[in-house]
């Protein structure tokens, strides 16, 4: 089998610009475990959480649950002090930028520099570390609804 392009690891260090939580429209898709952790963290019921803070997104034939955004496109849970649910933040946020889509090939990875100034900067993350994020996502897929 061919070695992945990240065989020798990839540099990434968050520059704390907040761009991945703010400014542009996007989705923060949730797994079942994310929902459970956020509900516990916010001390509300699952029904209230889904009703108040989530939307359903149609992805060509199936639906995922995403956190809603404010009218300025900031994530609903962003405020001036940062992420209001940081300890319970979803796997999508925790694992960024080690996502299947960005690790599919080197051009996808390098292209992400346009969106995140931490990509290809700072600390090197080993192949094992990167693949442990991918394994985590495999174990914890996005929640799907009817
Ligand atoms: S866009 Fe990148 S550098 Fe900016 S806050 Fe997000 S992870 Fe950090
Ligand atoms: S949940 Fe928190 S870390 Fe994730 S996008 Fe929203 S503000 Fe950012």
Image (tube, rainbow, N blue to C red):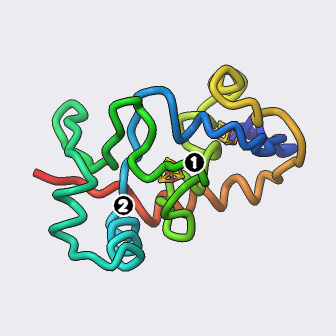
User: 10 Å neighbourhood of mark 1: few (<14), some, or many (≥20)?
Assistant: few
| Residue 40 percent across, percent down from the top left | 36, 79
Task: From the viewer's side, name the closer residue of 95 and 117.
Answer: 117
Label 1 element class: loop
User: Residue under circle 1?
Assistant: 80
| Residue 107 percent across, percent down from the top left | 68, 20
User: Residue under circle 2?
Assistant: 31
Direction from residue 9 to residue 42 in the image, left or right: left
Label 2 element class: loop
| Residue 27 percent across, percent down from the top left | 38, 39
Residue shown at the point (54%, 55%) measured from the top left: 83
Task: From the viewer's side, name the closer residue of 145 and 104.
Answer: 145
Task: From the viewer's side, name the closer residue of 109 and 83.
Answer: 83
Residue furthest to the left: 146
Direction from residue 103 to residue 76 in the image, left or right: left
| Residue 79 percent across, percent down from the top left | 51, 49
Residue shown at the point (41%, 31%) measured from the top left: 73
- Mark closest to the chain's N terminus, 2 or 1: 2
From what the image shows, is residue 55 above or below residue 104?
below
From what the image shows, is residue 15 above or below residue 38?
above
User: 10 Å neighbourhood of mark 2: few (<14), some, or many (≥20)?
Assistant: many
Q: Quadrant of the N terminus?
A: top right
Residue shown at the point (65%, 61%) measured from the top left: 132
Figure label count? 2
């Amino acid at each position: 089998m061919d070695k992945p392009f990240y065989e020798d690891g990839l540099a990434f260090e968050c520059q704390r610009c907040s761009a991945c939580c703010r400014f542009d429209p996007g989705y923060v898709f949730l797994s079942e475990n994310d929902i459970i952790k956020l509900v516990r963290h916010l001390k509300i019921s699952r029904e209230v959480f889904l009703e108040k803070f989530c939307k359903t997104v149609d992805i060509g034939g199936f639906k995922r649950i995403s956190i809603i955004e404010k009218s300025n496109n900031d994530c609903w849970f962003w405020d001036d002090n940062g992420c209001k649910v940081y300890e319970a933040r979803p796997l999508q946020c925790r694992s960024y930028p080690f996502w299947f889509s960005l690790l599919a090939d080197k051009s996808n990875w390098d292209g992400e520099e346009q969106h995140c100034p931490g990509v290809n900067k700072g600390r090197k993350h080993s192949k094992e570390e990167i693949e442990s994020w991918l394994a985590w996502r495999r174990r914890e897929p996005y929640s799907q609804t009817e």
